[in-house]
Image (cartoon, rainbow, N blue to C red):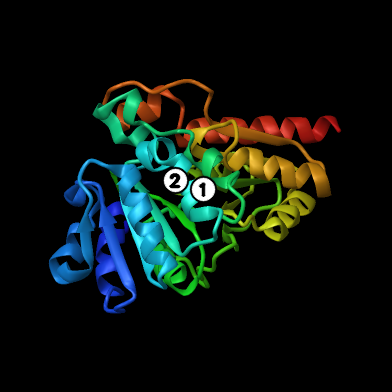
């Protein structure tokens, strides 16, 4: 079993690791210990700025810094990054194409006890509709580190979705794994159905594939860490070779990964696409583990969706 570490923790370490470049400026909205920008703040205090509980101001400050040639990172909870400062992200950062990296932590239901007001399950949908915005949702610590490197090499606005809870590190043990923005990674071969996952649901998808294997069903597992730009090639390849797709995400089934995959498949290679995620409802307060079960974000439910997709394929 791999190391258990939250993607926000891995992010904080990575930003500190790669933070020596004097062009990097980091901003936070009084959540440094939560977003893990505290690591950078401690090592590079002259390039760290705490805007206080003023997220919109923080976004404006970062836009100004980027307009002067800096690489700016802004940090807050995903609920605020995609909700409260949407206007500034769209108009002050993305519209002029500025090099600002928007980092939203504590995304999804796994925030747990913070409850529905802080469980952002709409951020992927909101961010992927902004023209020119790159949207990334890593599944583990290794992938998060690679995503930070890739964002630093990329000149343009990005949204990075991170979680609160610890997740198992898996990608460092996948033979041939390589991270590239806009390119998915096939983690397991399979010809009966393809399970396309993002974020912490990648680990659950692999577990679901194991359950299906016991029943003689060979499920392909694809890690789609970049929601935008979308890797249509790996999706269409999966559609042609398996004839059935399941998407799984810790996000509303409307507008996120499932919608993006269904759009791509519908245009190029129509096959059944069954979406798995939060069924268009708000969250509740509870432990992360209890909420994942309550909302059906489990390997068993993914396996059920896979069987549903296969059944639809056989009806064609």
Q: Quadrant of residue 45?
A: bottom left
Q: Is residue 228 left or right of residue 74?
A: right
Q: What's the residue at 60%, 56% (across, down)?
A: 132
Q: Can residue 197 be seen by looking at this rendering?
A: yes
Location of residue 287 with respect to 180 vertically, above or below: above
Toward the viewer: 124 or 22? 22
Q: Which mark is residue 6?
A: none
Residue 231 image position (x, y, % from top left):
65, 58
Residue 78 image position (x, y, % from top left):
37, 41
**Quarter of the C terminus within the rendering:** top right
Label 2 with label 1: CB-CB less than 8 Å: yes
Q: What's the residue at 40%, 70% (across, down)?
A: 68
Q: Which residue is mark 2?
A: 88
Q: Quadrant of residue 64?
A: bottom left
Q: Which residue is mark 1?
A: 91
Q: CA distance from mark 2 to mark 1?
A: 5 Å
């Amino acid at each position: 079993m791999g190391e258990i570490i939250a993607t926000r923790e891995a992010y904080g370490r990575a930003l500190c690791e790669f933070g020596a470049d004097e062009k990097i400026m980091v901003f936070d909205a009084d959540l440094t210990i939560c977003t893990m920008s505290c690591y950078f703040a401690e090592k590079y205090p002259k390039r760290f700025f705490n805007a206080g509980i003023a997220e919109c101001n923080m976004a404006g400050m970062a836009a100004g810094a980027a307009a002067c040639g800096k690489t700016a990172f802004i940090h807050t909870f995903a609920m605020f990054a995609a909700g409260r400062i949407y206007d500034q992200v769209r108009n002050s950062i993305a519209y002029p194409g500025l090099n600002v990296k928007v980092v939203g932590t504590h995304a999804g239901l796994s925030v747990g006890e913070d409850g529905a007001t802080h469980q952002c399950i709409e951020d992927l949908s909101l961010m992927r509709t902004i023209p020119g915005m790159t949207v990334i949702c890593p599944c583990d610590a290794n992938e998060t580190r690679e995503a930070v490197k890739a964002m630093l090499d990329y000149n343009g606005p990005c949204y990075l979705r991170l979680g609160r809870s610890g997740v198992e590190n898996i990608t460092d043990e996948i033979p041939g794994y390589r991270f590239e923005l806009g390119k998915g990674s096939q983690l397991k071969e399979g010809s009966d159905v393809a399970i396309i996952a993002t974020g912490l649901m990648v680990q659950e998808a692999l577990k679901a594939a194991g359950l299906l294997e016991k029943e003689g069903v060979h499920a392909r597992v694809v890690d789609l860490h970049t929601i935008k730009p979308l890797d249509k090639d790996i999706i269409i390849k999966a559609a042609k070779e398996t004839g059935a797709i399941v998407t799984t995400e810790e996000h509303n089934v409307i507008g996120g990964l499932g919608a993006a995959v269904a759009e791509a498949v519908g245009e190029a290679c129509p096959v059944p696409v069954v979406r798995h995620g939060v069924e268009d409802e708000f969250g509740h307060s509870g432990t992360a583990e209890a909420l994942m079960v309550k909302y059906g974000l489990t390997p068993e439910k993914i396996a059920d969706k896979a069987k549903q997709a296969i059944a639809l394929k056989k009806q064609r």
